[in-house]
Amino acid sequence: MSKYLIVIEETNTGYSAFSPDLPGCVATGKTKEEVEITMKEAIEIHLEGLKEDGEPIPPPRTYSTYCEVPA
């Protein structure tokens, strides 16, 4: 089991998500919950496609943190 970081951004119509470790793997949704579900499905499909094409599966390498600065 691998754990990939996903980045979720609010848009004018809902939310979009991507994974820095999986270029080209993106998803959208009307709610945060929906985009998390669709992104999980997108990652599964993306990884299946890589396997079918004989491509290597990129290991999860990115992480997130916050940096506080004076406003």
Image (tube, grey):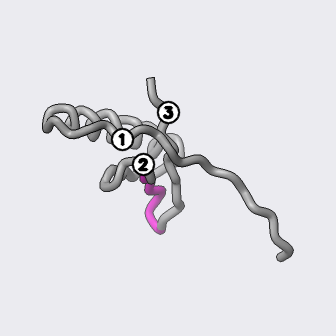
Name the residue nearer the viewer: 47 or 40.
47
Magenta stretch containing residue 14, yes or no? yes
Q: CA distance from mark 3 to mark 1?
A: 11 Å
Q: Residue furthest left?
A: 53
Earlier sequence position, callout 2 versus callout 3: 3
Q: Secondary structure at mark 2?
A: loop
Q: Which residue is at a point 42% across and 50% down the rendered structure image? A: 29
Q: Which residue is at a point 83% across and 76% down the rendered structure image? A: 71
Decide if residue 20 is on the left or right side of residue 47.
right
Figure quadrant of residue 48: top left
Earlier sequence position, callout 3 versus callout 1: 3
Residue at the disc numbered 2: 21
Mark drawn on residue 3: 3
Q: Residue furthest top?
A: 1
- Look at label 3 and name its amino acid: Lys
The residue segment tinted magenta is 12-19
**Mark 2 touches mark 1? (CB < 8 Å):** yes
Mark 3, residues whose alpha carbon is within 10 Å: few (<14), some, or many (≥20)?
Answer: few
Q: Residue furthest bottom?
A: 71
Q: Which residue is at a point 44% across and 53% down the rendered structure image? A: 20
- Look at label 2 and name its amino acid: Asp
Figure quadrant of residue 66: bottom right
Measured as percent of width and height from the top left, residue 70 is found at 86, 74
Earlier sequence position, callout 2 versus callout 1: 2
